[in-house]
Image (cartoon, coloured by chain):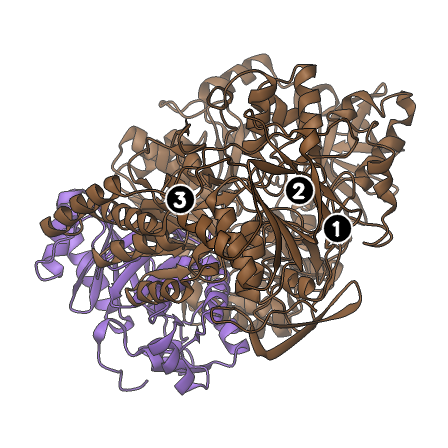
């Protein structure tokens, strides 16, 4: 693959050690007392040493978690070709403007008619990338697959006050009657370009440029703290997209 | 102390005492008191001094609508004492009086100086002699304004934020009408927000006899799921967004439908001395008594034009205030039941009369009442005086229509109602309650329910039964009886030849004489009058004064109130702190994935565009030398990085750049300069061909977004088979440079790094320290160098590995400042610093960039051909200065005393031990060895032009 240099999971073992990819703001999490663990080849924040408070935040106010390790793959091509590829790989799922589709723990998010972002749990990124490239190579016309896992950061914003946290940063109407489950929208958040996906209930995924990771994190933790919430780790959140907990977490 | 015995419905909690200070004196209060009610209970009647004449002022409305009680609380000026709750230990001080509230030297303006300060005095006085204007200005500026802000604030002390809220229905006003509207809307399934500027829902009715029923309605509203914001002031109507200020939050509410139930505002009366402490609105006096348990006065004269004044007199009487007499401007027509109750209570009632004068110097000591003729004028021979310490007045009410008008509703004068009422409303805007002319409680409640139902049903909520119910309620509303219309206009002020002042505008100290005088001068339309006198422009925004100003204008211009019209309603309707409007200071900043390491290494992190980057690590000179002597490592992750892929990718780049890229071989790199249609340089960077159909384009850090937009725009225009992906923030980039760079790199990768295998301008893919990388052998800093582009998530690992491997070779991290010196030694340009909007590649000493022999057109070709034809006029050159002086960047290049160019970059090179720089000079001076003169900060510097790089001009170190 000519774009292997984009793939965080393409690291090789040197002297018995494989470099583990990590969040671009792991340093900030460390400063905040985060516990760092390994999962699916990534260094991730499992918690902040306050398991009860983190669980309570997710249940009663708002928890914010850095899920930068989620895989993000961008598929570009003629709209009808992209539709066909998504249908093939997502069990027949179809996309509509503003509506993503979840299939086998992969979120397929339509950015434009000819541009789709697939968001995957980390253990599925490589296999989906391979599948996409295989199908893209066989598709008519020019179809490209680009790895954006490290280009986009992803924060989970979870809890009954998750919408209130967003309300401090964006004008998008996130009420359930206007932004239902699986709704997806590119939108300005805290004056930066981003995308919001409503996974289910009070669980949202916010995607944005990795360069803004520290800034966005600071803004959301500030908002969450005012609302009685806090930063949380993966232990409080559970595996992404409804998966089982990984064996080595 | 003026406390009344406890009563049901009062807001204060007598079990919880609170104390605070006012002008240094300790004041006892109860929780639930306002500053105003507590001060009044402590017999402090004067709370402030007026704006222009510094007259003593006291409580008037007790509802946050007039300017009389503005105080400074804990250093925050402009706080309304009548609505601000007391807090333990708060420090309240007066405003606008020196040296004290009791004795203010500026009162001289009122006593002696009012002839010098008529309306528009600043157009007539304090003008000559002109040379004294700076002095006048200083005096006037110090005299004007209300309150003072601290000169210094060490940090942002008050956390404010915006909250965006979408809703189906926004109800503004939490009185009976507003609550009914909100409740009905919620019952029909609407998502409802209700905002009220009082501390609790209920509005004016809370001060009445049925407070408990009102509070029960408020409970039902909350139970129905309505989001209640209180105290929360709606500030305006901005194309569908209503900002509502509540404490530290500005709620930006965008609703699909709106109900304005903003009520009505009781009006003061015009008479001499109508601003004395002790003159209060009837509703204000009632609020003090019923909500705060404070006796508003011992003995009261009540003056009114409507039944509400009679109700207030009875309420005050029941609260224990002696009613000296009631001056009712109506000769007849008062409510029969009220009249009977007044008779039973034996309260003196003077029909067809009005107060003409308040007596007293610092507060009300008495009132003079006179009979009125048929035209509403006082009959001088009928005056009778009475001792009192409270003058409770009611000039009727005006609907609070400002927000409705801002929303596009038109208002018309209703002679029967004696008010401007809202009429045709745009879709999605509804009025309810007193603002719509429904004054009785029953009608207000019904109108609210109708408005709420109309709003919800218009959003396709509810069903046929709800529609039927709405129709029935509409009929009931139409048929419902309103209380007797307040047909009697407020009596005109009568000065009777005295010099006593009668105030039309309490905020701006505009008297009725001022208005007449201004109309005589020719400012005879309301809008002109407003601008000339500033009437309605103060903190009350016309709440207390607009109708009386309109009435007087009509009288003085011999027109009607309807013909005069009203002024344009503008936001903010309520005062709001600037800090609330500012909200949270969002200042987006980008940081690389290695930022943590820069901090740990003591990086001096500063802004570079919208990135935070280390300028150095404490030793810029040492870092610069390390690159020459061993190796340096710099984080250049901020570079823009675009993947341009597709069968036409090469052709696409050929059209965009003056360079040629379609003949670039896979694995090779070429420097590119991007230009616009005018041939001007807009950005630069490198292009590496990854394979037949893919290119990796880098841009400047600050130009990344603009280049991506430029590419995307042209892609859409040309509709080529190309995909563009911005990976700028996904890939980190580390530049390892220096004579030891190859050795260090070789220790970390299996890639053959020999010069034969990995030449200058080669691009290769390999793992370095286990990290997948795209390695670009390029050089910006003049030494052997490699740019390693890798996934950001692995950048910290790679950075650590390079520094560890490079330690024996003397590797050091270096920042932007050393980089600037190093690139300057090579005469590499910085777009935007060494170039500007006029710079083209031919004159910027890069003619080799432009491939005029390309067959296809390219952006800027036509303009560049013109430049080539006319020849260079100015050239970008290097220069040196022998004596070590370093000119400022931006210093002028002068010839014959005239500026002919400018210095764009300048630094002292520690390696070359001399000053080097770049400058734009006339083409005639652009030859090697030419002498140029720089003018910089009052000094002249001699410099020598050099057009080749100062260091390694043959690029042996770079290409070796």
| Viewer-proximal residue among A229 and B455 | B455
Chain that is coloured purple in the picture: A
Pointer 1 chain: B
Task: Give the number of the disc on residue B365.
Answer: 1
**Numbered badge on residue A222:** none
Residue at the outermost left position: A92
The residue located at (64%, 30%) in the rendering is B378
Q: Nearer the viewer, mark 3 or mark 2?
A: 3
Chain bearing mark 3 = B
**Residue occupying the point 12% across, 54% down:** A94
Left or right side of B660 for B618: right
Residue B268 position within the rendered picture, expressed as x and y whole percent measured from the top left: 59, 41
Q: Position of residue A227 (x, y in %)?
A: 45, 70
Residue identified by numbered label 2: B953
Marks 3 and 2, how far apart in space?
A: 85 Å
Res B272 visible: yes
Q: Local crowd at mark 2 within 10 Å, few (<14), some, or many (≥20)? A: some
- B403 or B56: nearer the viewer: B56
Alpha carbons under labels 1 and 2: distance apart = 96 Å
Please identify which colour was used for chain B in the image.
Answer: brown
Q: Which residue is mark 3?
A: B434
Question: What secondary structure is found at the residue carrying circle 2?
Answer: loop
- On the image, the x and y values in percent for residue B302 come to 59, 48
Q: Evaluate whether residue B147 shows in this view.
A: no
Tell me which corner region of the image, top left, top right, bottom left or bottom right, holds residue B189.
bottom left
Q: Secondary structure at mark 1?
A: loop
Left or right position of A78 against B18: left
Q: Position of residue B869 (x, y in %)?
A: 55, 13
Indicate the chain on which mark 2 is placed. B
Residue B213 against residue A82 in the figure, above or below: below
Mark 1: few/some/many CA within 10 Å (<14, 14-19, 20+) = some
């Amino acid at each position: 693959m000519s774009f292997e240099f984009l793939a965080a999971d393409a690291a090789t073992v040197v002297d018995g050690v494989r470099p583990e990819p990590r969040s671009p703001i792991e340093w900030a999490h460390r400063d905040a007392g985060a516990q760092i663990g390994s999962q699916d080849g990534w260094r991730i924040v499992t918690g902040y040493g306050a398991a009860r408070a983190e669980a309570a935040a997710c249940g009663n106010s708002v928890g914010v978690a850095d899920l930068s390790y989620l895989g993000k793959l961008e598929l570009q091509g003629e709209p009808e070709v992209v539709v066909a590829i998504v249908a093939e790989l997502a069990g027949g799922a179809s996309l509509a403007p503003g509506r993503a589709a979840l299939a086998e723990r992969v979120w397929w998010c339509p950015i434009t008619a000819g541009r789709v972002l697939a968001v995957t749990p980390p253990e599925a990124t490589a296999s989906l990338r391979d599948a996409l490239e295989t199908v893209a190579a066989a598709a008519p016309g020019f179809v490209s697959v680009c790895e954006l896992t490290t280009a986009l950061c992803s924060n989970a914003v979870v809890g009954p006050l998750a919408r209130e946290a967003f309300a401090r940063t964006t004008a998008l109407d996130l009420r359930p009657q206007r932004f239902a489950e699986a709704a997806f929208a590119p939108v300005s958040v805290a004056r930066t370009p981003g995308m919001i996906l409503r996974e289910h209930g009070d669980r949202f995924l916010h995607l944005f440029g990795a360069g803004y990771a520290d800034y966005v994190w600071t803004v959301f933790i500030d908002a969450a703290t005012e609302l009685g919430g806090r930063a949380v780790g993966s232990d409080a959140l559970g595996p992404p997209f409804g998966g089982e907990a990984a064996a080595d977490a | 102390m003026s406390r009344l015995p406890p009563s049901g419905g009062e807001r204060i909690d007598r079990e919880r005492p609170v104390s605070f200070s006012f002008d240094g004196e300790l004041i006892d209060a109860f929780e639930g008191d306002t500053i105003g009610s507590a001060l009044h209970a402590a017999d402090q009647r004067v709370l402030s001094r007026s704006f222009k004449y510094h007259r003593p002022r006291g409580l008037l409305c007790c509802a946050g609508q007039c300017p009389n009680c503005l105080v400074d609380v804990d250093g925050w000026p402009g706080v309304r004492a009548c609505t601000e709750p007391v807090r333990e230990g708060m420090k309240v001080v007066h405003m606008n009086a020196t040296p004290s509230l009791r004795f203010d030297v500026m009162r001289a303006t009122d006593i002696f100086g009012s002839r010098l300060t008529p309306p528009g005095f600043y157009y007539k006085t304090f003008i000559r002699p002109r040379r004294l204007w700076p002095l006048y200005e200083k005096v006037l500026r110090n005299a004007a304004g209300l309150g003072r802000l601290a000169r210094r604030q060490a940090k942002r002390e008050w956390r404010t934020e915006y909250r965006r809220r979408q809703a189906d229905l926004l109800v503004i006003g939490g009185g009976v009408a507003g609550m009914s509207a909100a409740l009905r809307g919620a019952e029909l399934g609407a998502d409802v927000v209700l905002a009220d500027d009082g501390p609790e829902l209920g509005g004016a009715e809370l001060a009445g006899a049925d407070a408990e029923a009102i509070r029960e309605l408020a409970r039902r509203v909350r139970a129905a799921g309505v989001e209640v914001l209180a105290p929360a002031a709606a500030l305006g109507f901005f194309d569908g967004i209503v900002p509502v200020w509540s404490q530290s939050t500005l709620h930006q509410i965008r609703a699909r439908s709106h109900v304005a139930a903003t009520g009505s505002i009781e009006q003061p009366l015009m008479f001499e001395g109508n601003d004395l402490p002790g003159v209060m609105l009837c509703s204000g006096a009632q609020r003090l008594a019923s909500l705060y348990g404070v006796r508003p006065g011992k003995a009261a004269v009540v003056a009114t034009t409507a039944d509400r004044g009679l109700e207030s007199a009875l309420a005050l009487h029941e609260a224990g205030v002696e009613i000296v007499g009631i001056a009712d401007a109506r000769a007849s027509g008062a409510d029969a039941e009220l009249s009977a109750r007044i008779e039973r209570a034996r309260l003196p009632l003077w029909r067809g009369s009005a107060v003409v004068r308040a007596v007293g110097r610092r507060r009300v000591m008495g009132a003079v009442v006179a009979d009125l003729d048929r035209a509403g004028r006082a009959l001088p021979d009928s005056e009778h005086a009475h001792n009192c310490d409270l003058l409770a007045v009611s000039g009727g009410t005006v609907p609070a229509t400002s927000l409705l008008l801002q929303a596009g509703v038109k208002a018309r004068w209703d002679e029967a109602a004696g008010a401007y009422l809202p009429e045709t409303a745009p879709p999605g805007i509804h009025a309810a309650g007193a603002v719509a002319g429904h004054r009785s409680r029953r009608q207000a409640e019904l109108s609210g329910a109708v408005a709420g139902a109309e709003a919800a049903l218009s959003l396709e909520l509810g069903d046929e039964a709800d529609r039927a119910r709405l129709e029935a309620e509409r009929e009931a509303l139409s048929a419902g009886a309103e209380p007797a219309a307040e047909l009697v206009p407020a009596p005109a002020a009568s000065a009777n030849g005295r010099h006593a002042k009668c105030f039309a505008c309490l905020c701006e100290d505009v008297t009725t004489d001022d208005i007449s005088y201004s109309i005589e001068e020719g400012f005879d339309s309301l809008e002109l009058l407003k601008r000339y006198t500033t009437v309605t422009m103060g903190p009350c925004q016309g709440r207390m004064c607009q109708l009386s100003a309109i009435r007087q204008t009509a009288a003085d211009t011999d027109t009607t109130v309807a013909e005069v019209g009203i002024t344009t309603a503008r936001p903010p309707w309520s005062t709001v702190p600037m800090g609330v409007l500012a909200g949270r200071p969002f200042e987006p900043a980008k940081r690389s994935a290695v930022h943590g390491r820069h901090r740990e290494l003591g990086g001096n992190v500063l802004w570079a565009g919208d990135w935070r980057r280390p300028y150095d690590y404490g030793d810029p000179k040492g870092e610069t030398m390390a690159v020459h002597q061993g190796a340096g490592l710099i984080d250049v992750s901020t570079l823009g990085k675009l993947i341009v892929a597709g069968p036409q990718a090469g052709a696409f780049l050929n059209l965009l750049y003056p360079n040629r890229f379609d003949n670039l071989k896979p694995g090779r790199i070429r420097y590119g300069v991007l230009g616009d249609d005018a041939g001007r340089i807009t950005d630069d960077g490198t292009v590496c061909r990854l394979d037949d159909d893919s290119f990796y384009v880098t841009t400047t850090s600050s130009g990344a977004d603009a280049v991506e937009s430029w590419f995307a725009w042209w892609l859409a225009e040309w509709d080529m088979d190309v995909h563009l992906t911005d990976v700028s923030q996904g890939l980190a980039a580390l530049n390892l440079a220096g004579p030891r760079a190859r050795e260090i790199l070789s220790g970390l990768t299996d890639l053959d790094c020999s010069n034969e295998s990995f030449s200058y301008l080669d691009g290769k893919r390999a793992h370095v320290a286990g990290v997948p990388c795209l390695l670009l052998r390029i050089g910006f800093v003049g030494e052997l160098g490699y740019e390693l582009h890798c996934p950001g998530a692995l950048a910290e690992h790679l950075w650590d590995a390079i520094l560890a491997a490079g330690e024996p070779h003397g590797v050091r991290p270096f920042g932007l400042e050393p980089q600037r010196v190093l690139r300057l030694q090579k005469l590499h340009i910085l777009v935007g610093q060494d170039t500007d909007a006029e710079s083209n590649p031919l004159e910027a000493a890069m003619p080799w960039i432009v491939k005029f022999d390309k067959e296809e057109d390219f952006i800027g070709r036509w303009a560049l051909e013109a430049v080539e034809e006319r020849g260079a006029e100015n050239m970008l050159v290097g220069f040196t200065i022998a004596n070590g002086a370093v000119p400022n960047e931006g210093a002028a290049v002068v010839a014959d005393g005239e500026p002919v160019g400018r210095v764009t970059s300048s630094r002292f090179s520690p390696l070359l031990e001399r000053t080097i720089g770049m400058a734009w000079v006339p083409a005639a001076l652009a030859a090697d060895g030419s002498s140029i003169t720089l003018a910089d900060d009052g000094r002249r510097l001699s410099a020598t032009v050099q057009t080749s790089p100062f260091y390694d001009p043959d690029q042996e170190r770079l290409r070796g």
